[in-house]
Amino acid sequence: MMFLEFFVWGTWYVTTGVYLRKSLDFTGSEIGWVYSCSGIAAIIMPFIIGRLADKYFPIERLMAVLHSIAGAALLMAAQTNDFAHFFPWILLNALAYQPTMSLAISMSFYHQKEGMGQFPRIRLWGTTGWIVGGIIVSVMGWENVSMPLTLSGYVSFALAAYCLTLPSAKPLGKNTGLRDVLQLVNNKALIYTLIAMVFIMVPASFYYSFVNPFLVEKGVNFPAAKMSYGQVSEIIILSVLPFIMKKLSWRKMITIGFFVWGARYLLFLLPNAQTEFHYNLALALHGIAFCFSALTAQIFVNHIARPEMKSTAQGAYSLVVMGIGSMLGNIIAGNVVDLASTPAGQIAWDYVWTFAGIFGISSAVIFFLTSAGRFNEHL
């Protein structure tokens, strides 16, 4: 399930920025709005779907329906070539696909038997799926065509069918109500975690939307495959994350993740070398940035939620972080790229990466200074 869940997303999400800019001539702002669809969807859908999973429907059935809709939308998007028609289909895909990510996490926590340390070993298969998708796109030379969208659409249908074979995750919160929801969203630890994660979605948005176009413009060979260095490092970090969580506090892990999100972009400012070592290092640091921030935060959210409210809690995470945070981040990233672009379409990438780098490092410093004494427990 995890492999297919992230194969579907990884196959088109990172590389389509090149296709939109180079083949369809979308502006930076238009690309920003396309990538904001996941944020818009995360505001609307995951919390609602999470409540449905906690109260009414087994998770696997909800995922089957949603992936069918998401796949059909991708196939339709692949047939369009202008923003006015492309955007609605991608938005529909996001509305259907976005809640499946929190559902997949809830499914994993529902069935795991070995505590929080087991989840990273399950989640690494999602990263593997993302890597395989990116390698296929790169090897086939599909960065500038719509085939990644088409492939993801068909695999979405396969995933929908597979979800019906999963062990059932039946609702545990049939007796929960508005009071339980209010108790969850009033949790101070949850609120602080979500606000902190909103800030880091700004530099994260630059990675997903514009690193691939940057590498293509710099003449890097097989850019989609090389971006998988980040996912390879993610697998390595995931495999040792249970041990790390026993040694470091939540505060320290999040601070490190925030800092790396920013510091990695500063490597793109170094002069282009034939070895491209600094580019590859910046890509490889993705594993630390992602696992020490977003993934750790999701584990923490699951840790503080009651069993009958876990899908709702993950939906709240998606609403605030993947919704508000992602939408804000993508809009900022798109406009920064537009401001750094010449009338001829050339992008002053040094300005782009300086902004992203300083923002990420500043977020780490602010978080470290404001979180003292709040969350010192080990996960």
Image: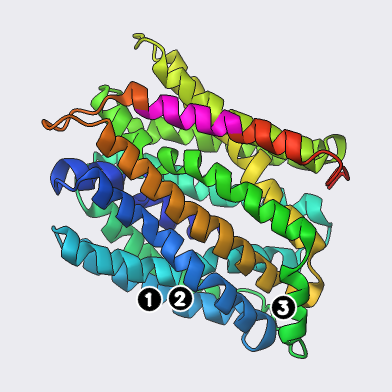
User: How far is the residue under mark 2 from the one under mark 1?
Assistant: 5 Å
Image vertical order of residue 211 relative to residue 126, above or below: above
The residue shown at (34%, 51%) is: 12
Image vertical order of residue 175 relative to residue 134, above or below: below
On the image, the x and y values in percent for residue 300 come to 76, 54
Examine the image and state in which quarter residue 187 appears: bottom right
| Coloring basis for residues | rainbow
Camera-near label (2 vs 3) is 3
**What's the magenta bit mostly, secondary-structure-wise?**
helix
Q: Secondary structure at mark 2?
A: helix
First along the sequence among labels 1 and 3: 1
Residue range of the region highlighted in magenta in the rendering: 352-362
- The residue pinned by badge 2 equals 66
User: How far is the residue under mark 1 from the one under mark 3?
Assistant: 28 Å
Query: Is there any visible trace of residue 79 in the rendered image?
Result: no
Magenta span includes 358: yes
Query: Is there any visible trace of residue 168 in the rendered image?
Result: yes
The answer to whether the residue labelled 1 contacts the one labelled 3, judged by CB atoms less than 8 Å apart, is no
The answer to whether the residue labelled 2 contacts the one labelled 1, judged by CB atoms less than 8 Å apart, is yes
**Dot 3 alpha-carbon crowd within 10 angstroms: few under 14, some 14 to 19, many 20 or more:** some
Q: Amino acid at mark 3?
A: Val
Return the mark for residue 181. 3
